[in-house]
Amino acid sequence: MEVIHKIGRRKTAVARVYVSEGKGNITVNKKDLNDYFTTGPLLYKVNQPLNLTGNDKNFDVKVNVYGGGITGQAEAIRLALSRAMVELDEENRGTLKPEGLLTRDPRMVERKKYGQKKARKKFQFSKR
């Protein structure tokens, strides 16, 4: 099997995922997964596509991720891994699609407007 390369994005985070046959090792930016993501919910998000498809011990995953915060990075990795699992076996689409793992989350930070303090917050109004 050749290496499968997929890209996932979330907010400003971009994850490039390289999936190859192996024993289930996941490295993120040349660090072990448990060293890069220290909290349980983030580890769950990254492993979710592998666990749902039952491939958590069959493939080695190398990830390059940049931009955004750690939550956005974890969700970008999740999307890229989901896309890779579908390319490996088209039947995985039926498992991942109902969970919403194949949909790019379109929500981005709203821009700040001039004449306002933030995107929605206004400057304090003085009547007199």
Image: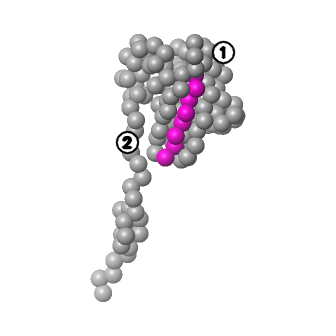
Left or right, 124 with reference to 74: left
In magenta segment, residue 15: yes
- Mark 2 — residue? 106
Q: How is the image coloured?
A: one colour
| Quadrant in the rendering for residue 29 | top right
Asked if residue 43 is positioned above or below residue 98 in the image, the reply reads below
Residue 101 horizontal/vertical position (percent):
42, 28
Secondary element type, mark 1? loop
In the picture as drawn, the residue positioned furthest to the bottom comes out as: 128
Residue 22 location, x and y as percent? 65, 15
Which residue is labeled 1 in the image? 23
Residue occupying image coordinates x 54% and y 22%: 4
Residue at 66%, 15% (x, y): give it: 23
Q: Which residues are magenta?
A: 12-19
**Quadrant position of residue 65:** top right
What's the amino acid at mark 2?
A: Pro
